[in-house]
Amino acid sequence: MSERLRVTILGSTGSIGRQAVEIAAFNSDRIEVVALAANSSFELLAEQARELGAGHVALADEAAARLLREARPDLSVDAGDAAIVELAERDDVDVVLNALVGSAGLRATVAALRSGHTLALANKESLVIGGPLVTALAEPNQLIPVDSDHSAIAQCLSGEDDRDVSRIWLTASGGPFRGMTREQLATVTPSQALSHPTWTMGPKITVDSATLMNKGLEVIEAHHLFGVPYPDIRVVIHPQSCVHSMVEFADGSVKAHLGATDMRIPIQYAFSSPRRWPSPVEPVDFQTLGRLDFGAPDLDVFRCLVLAFEAGHIGGTMPAAMNAANEVAVAAFLEGACGFLDIERVIDSVMREHEVEPLSSIDQVESVDAWARACAHKHLHTQE
Ligand SMILES: NC(=O)c1ccc[n+]([C@@H]2O[C@H](COP(=O)([O-])OP(=O)(O)OC[C@H]3O[C@@H](n4cnc5c(N)ncnc54)[C@H](OP(=O)(O)O)[C@@H]3O)[C@@H](O)[C@H]2O)c1
């Protein structure tokens, strides 16, 4: 049993986290879950700890942690943001899965890498905002992408020489509003935005998929993970989400990664890599799959993708400002406090106001994040 992979799951109560718990339970002969963390969902966290036999948990929310301590005196329960970072640093762990949402994941990403652990990274925001500061900490093969597109690209690149890569093609489903006009987008509701056609995900990334900001964040993530220049990263709309991404090489050959639209596959691969384990996912049946369609994104309608490319090109602290503005605007949209198109308006306004600096430290990224949040709140309340 001592040969089992020792894993910590940060964000275990979320969409990725719950699927990771399922994968850990399915592979209990290979995976030992040491620690779990979440924000405030203490009842689910307690249930997961019991199911997996994890002895250490942390909750960012202090009040939720107090309730959990009362309910489960047998568990070691820590509280606060620092406690989550400490879980990422524990020395009795091999792999940290960071499935926190938003820029809140940055400190854990940094802590896991500095501690020498393998980092299975679902929290794309930490790479978007921390960029080269994060990648500089990673040894070869220490940072394993969990995002389906980036897991696909990493697998397409396996056995290839980086010098032969000519382009990366990131596939996007197009989200629930594919084909809509800006007039139609002006009146869409949060519940419409939350009905994603192909993936079941947490609320923030689901709205990001509807605005195409998710693909924009993934473009920046791909740039940092694979060192490919922005002009060589292309986004293609692929409504069936069966092709998870593609790499094009100097001779015109293209390698694509295909599979079921099920995050349990890339989550499990982040643990099994470079080997593959049997998974609980039903494979694609190509005899009944039907057709695969591809097309260009409508950049006149989905402006968030344009803003993300722009932030990536500018670099420095701009992606951190853009990301924070997006987090604030998406939360406001979900609360019914602004319209769908206000998301891009707020991001655009914050980016115009941001005075970009070269990236220098995690503290600097966090202070830009705080500035951009305040700036975004200001623009949310101004109709331009
Ligand atoms: N869902 C997908 O299919 C998918 C695919 C690719 C990439 N990703 C990326 O994976 C990450 C997680 O996405 P998700 O969809 O799983 O999100 P989610 O369902 O909203 O779950 C987020 C998790 O993080 C915890 N959390 C939130 N804020 C926190 C904070 N301030 N401190 C500590 N914990 C906090 C939540 O705890 P509570 O439950 O207590 O709130 C929950 O466990 C995101 O970066 C997303 O872009 C997701």
Image (cartoon, rainbow, N blue to C red):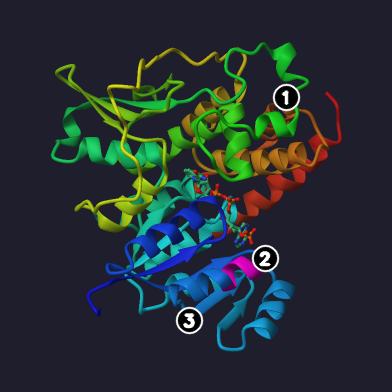
**Viewer-closest of 286 and 112:** 286
Q: In which quarter of the image is residue 381?
A: top right
Provide the secondary structure element on which disc 1 rests.
helix
Q: Which of marks 2 and 1 is in front?
A: 2
Q: Using the rendered image of the protein, determine whether residue 82 is visible from the camera's viewpoint.
A: no
Q: Where is residue 103 in the image (x, y as percent from the top left)?
A: 58, 52
Q: Name the residue under label 1.
A: 341
Separation of disc 3 and disc 1 at Cα? Answer: 45 Å
Q: In which quadrant of the rendered image does the C terminus lie?
A: top right
Question: What span is colored magenta in the figure?
Answer: 41-46
Q: Say what amino acid the circle numbered 3 marks.
A: Gly
Disc 2 residue lies near ligand 1 with CB under 8 A: yes
List the residue tagged with mark 2. 40
> Badge 3 is on which residue?
55
Residue 20, given in percent of the width and then of the height, sits at 43, 57
Q: Residues within 10 Å of mark 3 (few under 14, many from 20)?
A: some
Q: Which residue occupies 46% across, 76% down?
A: 54
Horizontal side, residue 96 vs residue 376: left or right = left
Tell me where residue 328 appears, x and y as whole percent: 71, 43
Gap in angstroms between the C-alphas marked 2 and 1: 30 Å
Name the amino acid, label 1: Leu
Q: At x 63% / y 43%, what residue is drawn? A: 203
Q: What element carries label 2?
A: loop
Q: Earlier in the sequence, mark 2 or mark 1?
A: 2
Identify which amino acid the numbered label 2 is placed on.
Ser
- Closer to the N terminus: mark 3 or mark 2? 2
The correct choice, above or below, for 81 with respect to 149 in the image is: below
